[in-house]
Image (cartoon, rainbow, N blue to C red):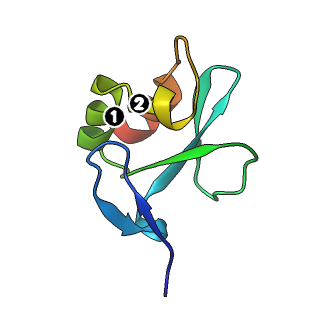
Amino acid sequence: MEPVRTCIGCRARAPRSSLLRVVLQDSHLVADAAAVRPGRGAWLHPTRECFLLADRRRAFGRALRFTGSLDTSDIQNRLNG
C-alpha cells in the first residue's frame, strides 16, 4: 500500500506519487520532485488551483513552520508550464 499525504491547498488526501513535495530553501519555495531534499516538506497537488488555494490560505508558512515572506516564483513557474 502506498503512503497517503494531504494536499495543503485543497486538503484532500491522495497517494504520495500524485502530489508534489515543496521545501523551503532560504525563504524560497522549491519543488522537490524526487522527495529527497532535507528538511520539512509540504505536499501539494501539481495544479494551479491547489497552489492558489494554498497561497491564499497562507498554508505554506504554516506547513513549513516559517514566519515571514515566502518567494513562490519557482513553484508558480513550474505549474504554469
Mark before the other along the chain sequence, 1 or 2: 1
Question: What crowding class fits label 1: few (fewer than 14 Cα within 10 Å), some (14-19), or many (20 or more)?
Answer: many
Q: Which mark is residue 37?
A: none
14 displayed left or right of 37: left
The reply to whether callout 1 and callout 2 are in contact (CB within 8 Å) is no
* 67 vs 32: above or below: above
Q: Which residue is at the front of the view, 28 or 78?
A: 28
Q: Nearer the viewer, mark 1 or mark 2?
A: 1
Residue denoted by label 1? 54
* Residue 81 seen in the figure: no
Instruction: Name the foreground residue: 62 vs 70.
Output: 62
The amino acid sitting under disc 2 is: Gln
Residue behind mark 2: 76
Q: Position of residue 12 (x, y in %)?
A: 28, 57
Residue drawn 26% across and 47% down? 10
Q: As drawn, which residue projects farthest toward the top?
A: 69
Mark 2 element type: helix
Task: Measure the C-alpha gap from mark 1 to mark 2.
Answer: 12 Å
**Residue, far bottom:** 1
Can residue 39 be seen in the rendering of this structure? yes
The image shows residue 68 at horizontal and vertical percentages of 55, 11
Q: Amino acid at mark 1?
A: Ala
* 23 horizontally vs 62: left or right: right
Q: Position of residue 19 (x, y in %)?
A: 43, 58
Decide: is 62 above or below 35.
Answer: above
Looking at the image, which residue is at 41% across and 30% down? 76
Residue at the image position 29 percent from the left and 50 percent from the top: 11
Residue 48 is left or right of residue 44, and the answer is left
